[in-house]
Image (cartoon, rainbow, N blue to C red):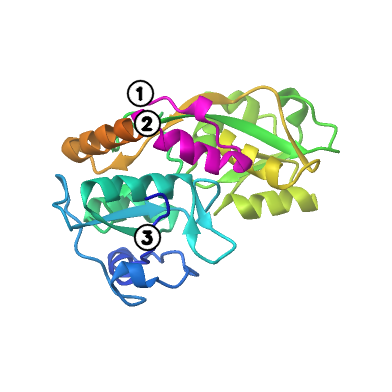
């Protein structure tokens, strides 16, 4: 099984968010008949720890504006490399998959409350090791800077006096406030925004001069907009993606690790990479063996 089963699970997430006065992302596609539930109905409660039993719901929290790992396709359905991975993992373990688009700022509350089973959506491990139990790294990633092709900006040093934007609570922001803080201090401004699609709209319009983002996001945007953007040659950092679970949920992380290894051994991972190659996904960047 390579296509994700879509289930909004809106009522459960809304209840969790109401408790902390936060609002979840809206605008999710309608549920399909495969979910076995009507739009707006909640999935079965997610266990705080341990491995779901066969037939139980495994709820994936993801950013629906994070192509190519999780996004809304042209058909209005959720799609993406990570969502396909999750769907196959659920198929092989007999779990019912529920896809829950989340407000990224609320991800920790949703995970710790049990409203979602994991965060699986181009989720950078480095710098977050103390906050989650992660799967083993499965995909190489890096933090990079993208500019307009006609901007004349050719290096990180050329960003001095420029307006740079990145996603709120992102790995790129962590790097620019941490190891690359000296570089960020040369910018005219470093702003954040809720999701990268809007950041790139601002870059295209000239409202900002550069976007700091994951390598995968850069590759996707450059593939979708040929000759519009270029990536600066120097990386801000090199990192890896993993699946984030509630701290201490080692058993579930190990089960997902074993399933991903089996998928790699039988060629499923390479097949999925080929499916998303046009979006910048490469099997060469797969690291879990």
Q: Is residue 68 magenta?
A: no
Whole-percent x, y for residue 81 in the image = 47, 45
Name the residue at 37% across, 50% down.
1
**Most foreground residue, 119 or 203:** 119
How far apart, in angstroms, are the residues tagged by discs 3 and 2?
21 Å
Q: In the rendered view, does 152 fall on the left or right side of 85?
A: right
Q: Which residue is mark 3?
A: 5
The quarter of the displayed image where residue 258 is located: top left
Examine the rendered structure and indicate whether residue 19 appears above or below residue 172: below
Which sits earlier in the primary sequence, circle 3 or circle 2? 3
User: Are the residues flagged by discs 1 and 3 in contact, CB closer than 8 Å?
Assistant: no
Whole-percent x, y for residue 185 in the image = 64, 30
Name the residue at 63% across, 42% down.
278
The number of numbered badges drawn on the structure is 3
- Give the residues in magenta: 265-289
The quarter of the displayed image where residue 132 is located: top left
Does residue 165 appear anywhere in the picture? Answer: yes
The secondary structure that most of the magenta stretch takes on is helix
Whole-percent x, y for residue 204 in the image = 77, 50
Q: In terms of secondary structure, where does tag 2 sit?
A: helix
* Mark whose residue sits in front, 1 or 2: 2
User: Are the residues flagged by discs 1 and 2 in contact, CB closer than 8 Å?
Assistant: yes
**Most foreground residue, 60 or 181:** 60
Which sits earlier in the primary sequence, circle 1 or circle 3? 3
How far apart, in angstroms, are the residues tagged by discs 1 and 2?
7 Å
Examine the rendered structure and indicate whether residue 189 appears above or below residue 238: below
Q: In terms of secondary structure, where does tag 1 sit?
A: loop
* Label placed on residue 289: 1
Q: Is residue 277 magenta?
A: yes
Q: Which residue is mark 2?
A: 264
């Amino acid at each position: 099984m390579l296509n994700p089963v879509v289930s909004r699970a809106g009522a459960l997430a809304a209840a969790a968010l109401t408790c902390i006065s936060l609002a979840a992302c809206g605008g999710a596609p309608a549920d399909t008949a495969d979910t076995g539930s009507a739009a707006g109905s909640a999935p079965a409660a997610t266990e705080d720890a341990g491995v779901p039993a066969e037939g139980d719901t495994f709820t994936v929290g993801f950013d629906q504006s994070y192509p190519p790992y999780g996004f809304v396709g042209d058909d209005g359905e959720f799609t993406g490399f990570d969502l396909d991975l999750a769907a196959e993992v659920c198929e092989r373990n007999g779990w019912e998959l529920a896809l829950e688009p989340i407000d990224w700022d609320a991800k920790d509350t949703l995970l710790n409350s049990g409203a979602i089973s994991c965060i699986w959506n181009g989720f950078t491990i480095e710098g977050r090791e103390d906050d989650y139990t992660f799967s083993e790294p499965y995909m190489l990633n890096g933090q990079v800077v993208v500019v307009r092709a006609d901007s004349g900006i050719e290096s990180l040093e050329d960003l001095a006096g420029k307006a740079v934007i990145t996603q709120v609570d992102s790995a790129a922001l962590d790097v620019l406030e941490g190891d690359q803080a000296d570089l960020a201090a040369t910018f005219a401004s470093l702003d954040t925004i809720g999701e990268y699609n809007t950041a790139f709209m601002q870059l295209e319009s000239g409202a900002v001069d550069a976007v700091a983002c994951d390598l995968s996001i850069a590759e996707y945007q450059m593939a979708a907009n040929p000759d519009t953007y270029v990536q600066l040659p120097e990386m801000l950092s090199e990192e890896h993606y993993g699946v984030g679970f509630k701290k201490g949920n080692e058993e579930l992380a190990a089960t997902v690790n074993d399933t991903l290894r089996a998928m790699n051994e039988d060629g499923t991972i390479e097949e999925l990479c080929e499916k998303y190659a046009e979006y910048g996904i490469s099997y060469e960047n797969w690291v879990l063996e």
